[in-house]
Image (cartoon, helix red, strand yellow):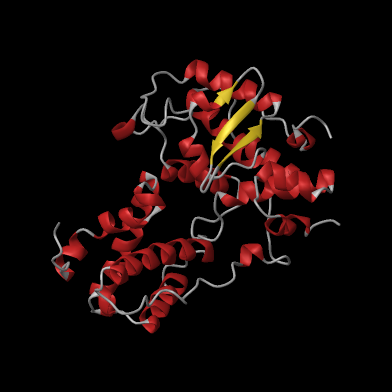
């Protein structure tokens, strides 16, 4: 057994392997590791080029300065900053466990309150706006059908970007309309609207070849030259939504504060306005705690399990 201490240089070259050992019993999801790697390397660039220091020499004040840089210079949403700080916290924790630093400087540095969660400033697309967004997409052509289906799953069923990326054909029972959703922390079930099922079937009939991977046969495939037929990436999903937001006048090209999550939030808000039942919203959005769901009651103070049929949107 090798008991020699790990050098700083070796740790810096192999930091993601150490984080992998420390996370989820040594078996974290690959897309989680990819996100950690990207965010930590961005932090490294800031350290070397802007702060002019070695990352492991950072103090809590340095981490706060980096957070402020993400806010003010990069103009990132607080939720995005929070994800980046989580990755940085993992990096320092791995170094701490191996005796390379004495404290984790990122431990008590947080992104702050996300204005999207503020009850007075939360924005959403009401049913009319959501219908206008869907109407921008033609009803034929594989790319258009893919966009309509993604909007339906996010805006009417409440799926997250990562859940669209991870979705596989094998996850859906097209007879019952039940979909297994591979969530960010745990899996759950979604009871698809009948029109959503029909739309997915129409898309699948025309989409062509799909490359299987370790998750199965991707539900949504990329049309990009370098990944044609492969699973659509999270960036690919964001690009589709961002272009539609800009086309609809929902988001200016310079506005980084609206994201795909607006669709999930719209699903929750519209559903609450229709049902006035937070437990229904909790079930549809798969919130573990009801406290997370209460933000959807800010606008206005059971039919099998297809509660989202209540949202009056035509997607076909």
Q: Within the image, what quadrant is residue 223 found in?
A: top left
Picture residue at 28% right of the left edge, 56% below the top: 16
Q: Nearer the viewer, residue 279 or 50?
A: 279
Q: Position of residue 303 (x, y in %)?
A: 82, 31
Q: Position of residue 173 (x, y in %)?
A: 59, 22
Picture residue at 42% right of the left edge, 45% below the top: 235
Q: Position of residue 45 (x, y in %)?
A: 27, 67
Residue 81 seen in this snapshot: yes
Residue at the outermost front position: 1
Count of labels in the image = 0
Picture layout, residue 109 above or below residue 219: below
Picture layout, residue 146 above or below residue 154: above
Q: Quadrant of the C terminus?
A: top right
Q: Nearer the viewer, residue 6 or 203?
A: 6
Residue 316 seen in this snapshot: no
Picture residue at 55% right of the left edge, 73% below the top: 112
Q: Position of residue 22 (x, y in %)?
A: 35, 57
Q: Within the image, what quadrant is residue 187 found in?
A: top right
Left or right, 39 with reference to 8:
right
Q: Within the image, what quadrant is residue 299 found in?
A: bottom right
Q: Quadrant of the N terminus?
A: bottom left
Left or right, 234 with reference to 186:
left
């Amino acid at each position: 057994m090798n008991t020699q201490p790990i050098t700083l240089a070796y740790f810096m070259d192999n930091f993601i392997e150490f984080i992998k050992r420390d996370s989820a019993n040594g078996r974290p999801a690959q897309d989680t590791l990819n996100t950690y790697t990207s965010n930590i390397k961005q932090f490294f660039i800031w350290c070397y080029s802007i702060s002019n220091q070695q990352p492991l020499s950072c103090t809590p004040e340095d981490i706060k300065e980096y957070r402020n840089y993400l806010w003010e210079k990069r103009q990132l949403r607080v939720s995005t900053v929070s994800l980046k700080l989580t990755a940085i916290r993992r990096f320092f924790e791995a170094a701490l466990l191996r005796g390379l630093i004495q404290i984790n400087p990122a431990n008590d540095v947080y992104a702050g309150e996300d204005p999207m969660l503020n009850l007075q400033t939360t924005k959403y697309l009401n049913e009319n706006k959501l219908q206008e967004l869907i109407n921008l997409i033609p009803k034929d052509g594989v790319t258009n059908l893919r966009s309509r289906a993604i909007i339906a799953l996010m805006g009417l069923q409440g799926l997250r970007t990562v859940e669209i990326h991870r979705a596989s054909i094998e996850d859906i029972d097209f007879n019952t309309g039940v979909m297994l959703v591979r969530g960010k922390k745990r899996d759950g079930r979604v009871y698809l609207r009948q029109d959503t099922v029909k739309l997915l079937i129409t898309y699948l009939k025309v989409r062509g070849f799909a490359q299987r991977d370790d998750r199965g046969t991707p539900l949504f495939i990329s049309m990009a030259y370098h990944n044609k037929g492969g699973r659509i990436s999270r960036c690919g999903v964001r690009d589709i939504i961002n272009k539609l937001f800009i086309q609809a006048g929902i988001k200016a090209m310079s506005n980084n504060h609206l994201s795909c999550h607006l669709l999930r939030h719209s699903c929750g808000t519209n559903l609450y306005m229709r049902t006035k039942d937070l437990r229904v919203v909790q079930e549809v959005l798969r919130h573990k705690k009801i406290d997370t769901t209460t933000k959807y009651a800010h606008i206005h103070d059971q039919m099998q399990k297809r509660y989202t049929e209540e949202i009056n949107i035509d997607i076909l």
